[in-house]
Image (cartoon, rainbow, N blue to C red):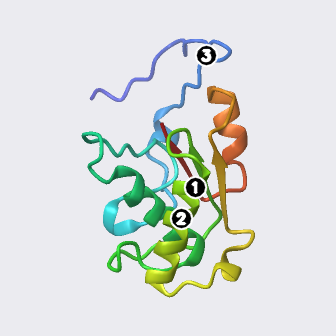
Amino acid sequence: MNGTRPVDAPQRPEGLNIIGASELFAPLPPVDWLCQSLRIAPGAPTLFAGYGYSGKSVALQCMALSVASGCALWGKYACKRGRALHLDYEQGRRITSSRYQRLAFADGVDPRELVGWLECGVLPSMSLTTDLLCRVGENRTLVEVDS
């Protein structure tokens, strides 16, 4: 590097969030992990994918229950306690409720301790848009969409 600086700094077009080198190399705060062992944190979505009937829904219901109760996920991975919302576009109320009841019982979680921490949208009639997903995620630690 010869130590020279650009003569004219380019203009930053409105709506394009351009940051300079000083911002790029500024110290970063620690990551606010939801589940550090699984590297799940706020930001980019985490995708659970697999064949039908491979256990994705029950695995994610376990995650929602763990976050809402503050218990270890799958009995192994520490999770930060927070408000969880499960959007169930697939199973329906009977299966979803029955499974949450069984999972809570197995984990020794008192359902009364989940009031205000765990919610479920069962077979919502609206499709998700980016704006709607952002709004339902406000003041929640976890939002799961089970398509």
- Viewer-proximal residue among 2 and 40: 40
Under tag 1, what secondary structure?
helix
Identify residue for label 3.
12
Q: What residue type is labelled 3?
A: Arg
Query: Vertical placement of 79 versus 40: above or below?
Result: below
Q: Residue at x 48, y 74 (%)?
A: 102
Q: Is residue 141 above or below residue 50?
A: below
The residue pinned by badge 1 equals 94
Between marks 3 and 2, how big is the CA–CA gap?
A: 54 Å
Where residue 138 is drawn, which disc sits there? Answer: none
Residue 100 appears in the figure:
yes
- SS at circle 2: helix
Other residues around mark 1 within 10 Å, as few (<14) / some (14–19) / many (≥20): few
| Apparent side of residue 47 relative to residue 14 in the rendered image (left or right) | left
Q: What element carries label 3?
A: loop
- Give how far across and how far down residue 45 sits, in percent: 45, 42
**Residue at numbered disc 2:** 98
Which of the 4 quarters of the picture holds residue 140?
Answer: bottom right
- Residue at 62% in and 39% down: 123
Contact, mark 1 vs mark 2 (Cβ under 8 Å): yes
Q: Alpha-carbon neighbours of circle 2 within 10 Å: few (<14), some, or many (≥20)?
A: few
Cα distance, mark 1 to mark 2?
6 Å
**Which quarter shows the N terminus?**
top left
Mark closest to the chain's N terminus, 1 or 3: 3
Residue 145, image x, y percentages: 52, 43
Q: Which residue is drawn at 35% across and 73% down?
A: 74
Q: Residue furthest front?
A: 94
| Residue nearest the observer in this picture, 127 or 46 | 127
